[in-house]
Image: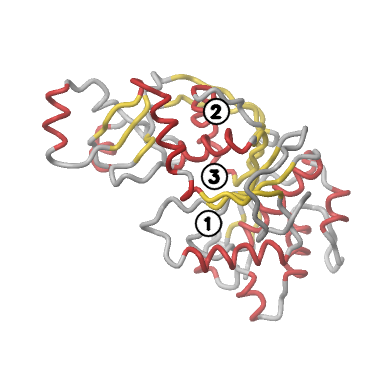
């Protein structure tokens, strides 16, 4: 049943063991860190007999330019590493009605918010260690008259009333992670559906019960787990994997040189080289060893994965 990432389908028969997913955003070419996370998602899914689904997270249309061309390059790079995915390929831009339906399902717990980021930053308590500022509740209990007045000055975002719920999730690599759920955004003021809503709605619809992604998203897991339960879904198993960083210890980005497969190819390093580097960074291969995904899968054990960022010098 697995197919290459360019394959399409309208429906699939879910694996009895569930499904994992890889969900890139077509804002730029995938760099070696993105590809490493994709390989790990493949290892986690295939080692547990799960399907692995591909979802293109293309909601942020203000930032996406030539998204179709970027998506095509991303899919080609995933295929070049030998990664296969199970159908169907899902695009968030095709699922806007599903997000609206989810908000309707949440009913009167959803409310309008007119705050700017600056106003939230000035009113909120000190940011968390990851920089996140919890919403202070400014618009939670406005009267109808106050809402009507504020609509005249700016469009409303939509937030969910979470009542500061405390949620603990268990991550395969990090163990128990507890977070307090603030009244987070479901739809932005510009009308775009928010990440925290879309990924939860999609994971439920796609039967995803295993989420493997970079650990800079670890703090969002309690929030998304809470929303999953509000929408009648089952909380997935989480595995937040360490980032690939540059020599300064900062998350890898295009400005760091030869970081995409196209960049590497220009320096004489192909997808085979990239897979070997990824394998070494995961303690799955020795320097100079030629590897295949099948060989690496036979060696894969989550307990042996490094838990600290890996430095890549392009």
Label at residue 216:
3
Query: Which residue was labeled with disc 2?
Result: 225
Q: Residues within 10 Å of mark 3 (few under 14, many from 20)?
A: few
Point 57% across, 23% down: residue: 168
Label 1 and label 2: CA atoms lie apart by 28 Å
Point 45% across, 42% down: residue: 195
Q: Secondary structure at mark 1?
A: loop
Point 52% across, 69% down: residue: 69
Q: Secondary structure at mark 3?
A: helix
Quarter of the image for residue 292 reads bottom right
Quarter the C terminus occupies: bottom right
Residue 57 lies, with reference to residue 15, above or below; the image says below
Q: State which tag comes first along the sequence, 1 or 2.
A: 2
Q: Percent from the top left, x then y, of residue 24?
A: 56, 54
Camera-side mark, 3 or 2: 2
Camera-side mark, 1 or 2: 2
Q: Secondary structure at mark 2?
A: helix
Q: Residues within 10 Å of mark 2 (few under 14, many from 20)?
A: many
Q: Percent from the top left, x then y, of residue 254?
A: 52, 67
Label at residue 49:
none
Query: Which residue was labeled with disc 1?
Result: 250
Q: Percent from the top left, x then y, of residue 54?
A: 63, 50
In the picture provided, is 99 more to the left or to the right than 310? left
Label 3 and label 1: CA atoms lie apart by 12 Å
In depth, the one of 18 and 175 nearer the eye is 18
């Amino acid at each position: 049943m697995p197919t290459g990432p360019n394959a399409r389908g309208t429906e699939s028969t879910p694996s009895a063991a569930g499904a994992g997913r890889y969900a890139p955003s077509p804002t730029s070419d995938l760099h070696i860190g993105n590809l490493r996370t994709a390989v790990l998602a493949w290892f986690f899914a295939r080692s547990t007999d799960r399907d692995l689904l591909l979802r293109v997270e293309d909601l942020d249309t203000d930032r996406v330019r030539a998204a179709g061309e970027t998506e095509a390059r991303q899919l080609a790079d995933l295929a070049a590493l030998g990664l296969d995915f199970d159908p169907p390929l899902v695009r968030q831009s095709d699922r806007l009605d599903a997000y609206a339906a989810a908000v309707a399902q949440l009913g009167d717990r959803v409310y309008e918010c007119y705050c700017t980021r600056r106003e939230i930053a000035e009113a909120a308590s000190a940011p968390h260690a990851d920089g996140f500022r919890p919403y202070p509740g400014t618009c939670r209990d406005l009267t109808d008259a106050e809402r009507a007045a504020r609509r005249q000055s700016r469009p409303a975002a939509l937030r969910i009333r979470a009542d500061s719920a405390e949620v603990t999730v268990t991550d395969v690599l990090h163990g128990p992670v507890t977070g307090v759920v603030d009244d987070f955004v479901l739809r932005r003021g510009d009308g775009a559906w928010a990440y925290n809503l879309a990924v939860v709605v999609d994971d439920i619809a796609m039967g995803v019960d295993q989420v493997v992604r970079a650990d800079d998203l670890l703090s969002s897991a309690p929030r998304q787990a809470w929303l999953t339960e509000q929408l009648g879904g089952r909380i997935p198993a989480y595995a937040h994997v360490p980032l690939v960083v540059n020599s300064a210890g900062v998350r890898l980005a295009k400005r760091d040189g030869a970081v995409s497969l196209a960049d590497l190819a220009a320096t004489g390093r192909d997808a085979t080289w990239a897979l070997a580097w990824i394998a070494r960074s995961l303690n799955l291969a020795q320097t100079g060893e030629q590897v295949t995904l099948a060989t690496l899968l036979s060696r894969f054990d989550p307990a042996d994965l490094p838990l600290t960022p890996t430095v890549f010098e392009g």
